[in-house]
Amino acid sequence: MPLPRAIHKDQYEERFATISDHEKEIARKWYIFDANTDFYRLVHLTDKDDPEYWNEAYPVLLKALDGVEFAPSLFIGRSVTELEAWYAMLNPDGALWWRRIFTNPEMAYPVHPDDMGRELRDKRDNVKAQTSLDALLEEMKKNFLPQNIHEQSVSVEAYKEQGPNASQEHRDYFKDFEEHYLEAFKVHVEALIQRKQDWDRNGSGVGLPGESLDEMLHHCLWARTKFESFQGRESLIEECMARIVEHREEGEYDS
């Protein structure tokens, strides 16, 4: 489970007010406020294997900030897979879901630690993880378009098989996966090619070549980025003006 690189001031400070003094001390060290963007930003690691971060800061911050929203519908404490699923649901029209359904899920329990299919863990080992998974599946069922969901059943034994001696069920399952998504990707690629051609020709109906619009949009994006990062200094200017007026009244600037 990753920690986000940035958390908006409102979400961060609301949670910060509720955590322990020890957690606050670590949070102050690793999340620094950026006044230009109103975000708290995670300090860059000088070493990706920094033991102070991974052994001391990471576990404390992950627990202290659990559930804090750092992007629309994305919350700290979710697994990478869960975050990817939620990100896909932000644009359900283009998201595809291959839903694997085990015909005999009871055979997945227990799984030997050295088993290659160790993602099939006994759900009793982590009630919170199972609860999160069930909730995620319900959200995916509601948010994914029905035509973008493909369900395929397979037994636990067949799914876990490997090598040339795998059963026919195993081969059929993965052949169906390959053929289904090969066709789905071909459709998407062809649609992208058509959209690119329309854009190059007339800006997808705008009436200008795509190359010209690209240049115009580039400058618009640059101007917007500069504008969004601007932080006014009205209070500082007012303070300066007040001091100038004060000194004038005291006669310090009289000729």
Image (tube, rainbow, N blue to C red):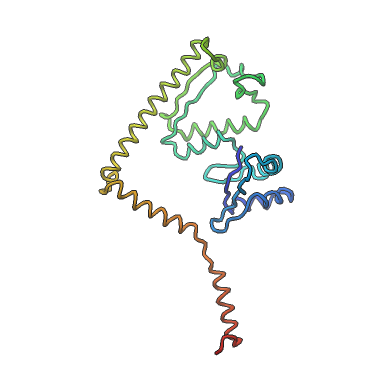
Question: From the viewer's perspective, is 21 left or right of 3?
Answer: right
Q: Residue furthest bottom?
A: 255
- Which residue is depicted at the point 59% across and 78% down? 243
Q: Position of residue 116 (x, y in %)?
A: 60, 20
Q: Is 109 above or below relative to 28?
A: above
Question: From the viewer's perspective, is 210 left or right of 63?
Answer: left
Q: Is 91 above or below relative to 101?
A: below
- Which residue is depicted at the point 53% across and 69% down? 234
Could you tell me which quadrant the N terminus lies in?
top right
Quarter holding residue 122: top right
The number of callouts visible is: 0
Q: Position of residue 17 (x, y in %)?
A: 68, 53
Q: Position of residue 166 (x, y in %)?
A: 52, 11
Q: Is 118 above or below relative to 141?
A: above
- Which residue is depicted at the point 50% across and 14% down? 170
Q: Nearer the viewer, residue 130 or 232?
A: 232
Q: Is 162 above or below relative to 243?
A: above
Quarter holding residue 135: top right
Q: Position of residue 141 (x, y in %)?
A: 49, 31
- Which residue is depicted at the point 34% across and 51% down? 215
Could you tell me which quadrant the C terminus lies in?
bottom right
Q: Residue furthest front?
A: 47
Quarter holding residue 109: top right
Question: From the viewer's perspective, is 144 left or right of 104?
Answer: left
Q: Nearer the viewer, residue 129 or 197?
A: 197
